[in-house]
Amino acid sequence: MSEHPPFAVTVDLAIFTIRNGALSVLLVERGEDPYAGRWALPGGFVGPDEDAEAAAWRELAEETGVSRAEAGEWGHLEQLRTYSAPDRDPRMRVVSVAHVAFAPDLPEPTAGSDATQARWWAVQDVVGEDADAPRLAFDHAEILADALERVRSKLEYTTLALQFVDEPFTLPELHRVYAAVWGEAPDLGNFRRKVLKTPGFVSPTDEKADADAAGGPRPLLYRRGPGRTLQPAMLRPGGDA
């Protein structure tokens, strides 16, 4: 007989998008014990014939309808870290390989067989200290906090924010993506200068946006540049300039 007790491997997904101008995360309400009735990140057990990455893509497709084959340039999925505290799941020893996904225009979710409902939550309504904020099952509050930091840092050194604006776009439109993800708007003047000075970030067009109702100046329109990383980084408010 083996001296090692059996344990299971799961994947948990922190799936983010921007809805109604706010960074939002997908949560499911658990329909079964443990933690029946509590909200949790979507996820599931890794099958005997799949690795953790394949399981993460499978869970993402089940929750959002976005398959790995269809993903293309839709957004971003990556492994976050492994969570292995011995008591993190009351059923048995369960190790979770957590992943973070960030993509635009994700649809209304579909609850899986072990959930009573699934919905998008504004991140500020989940991670804040409001008494109405849901208490997440397992160690999912920790996973969500780590995933949120990962997504926010991604916008500092990659061009991922460009996936959340339709081409052609204005710099104020791109600025609103950063404000939504970071939870605080960077200074627009500094933001504009950093975007335009970063090679490969955006490509200007010869067009201007339509005039707004106030009759102000028509802003220039841009397209996504060829770059994928930002040098220098686009630091969050409060960081070094």
Image (spheres, rainbow, N blue to C red):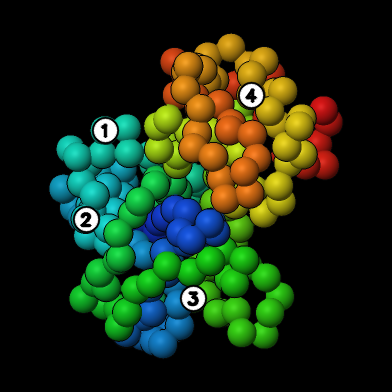
Q: Report x, y in % for residue 193.
A: 72, 23
The foreground one among 90 and 107 is 107
Q: Which residue is mark 1?
A: 72
**Tag 4 residue:** 195
Residue 169 locus on image (x, y percent): 48, 33
Left or right: 194, with 241 as reference point: left
Q: Quadrant of residue 33?
A: bottom left
Q: Quadrant of residue 95?
A: bottom left
Circle 4 Cα neighbour tier, 10 Å, few/some/many (<14 / 14–19 / ≥20) = some
Tell me if residue 14 comes above or below residue 153 in the rendering.
Answer: below
Look at label 3 and name its amino acid.
Ala
Between disc 4 and disc 3, whose residue precedes? Answer: 3
Closer to the N terminus: mark 2 or mark 3?
Answer: 2
Q: Is residue 16 left or right of residue 130?
A: left
- Mark 4 vs mark 1, foreground winner is 4
- What residue appears at the point 60 percent right and 21 percent down from the top-left corner? 230
Q: Which residue: 53% across, 66% down?
A: 122
Q: CA distance from mark 4 to mark 2?
A: 33 Å
- For marks 4 and 1 on the same chain, the one whose residue lies earlier in the sequence: 1
Pointer 2 residue: 65
Q: Rate crowding at label 2 as few (under 14), some (14 to 19) or many (20 or more) other CA atoms within 10 Å.
A: some
Give the class, few, some or many, for how many residues have Cα within 10 Å of label 3's Cα (few <14, many ≥20): some
Is residue 163 depicted above or below 194 in this figure?
Answer: below
Which quadrant is the N terminus positioned in? bottom left
Residue drawn at the location 44% of the way across and 53% of the way down: 17
Residue 85 in view in this figure: no
Kind of residue at badge 1: Gly
Which of disc 3 and disc 1 is earlier in sequence? Answer: 1
| Residue indicated by mark 3 | 137
* Disc number lying in front (4 or 2): 4
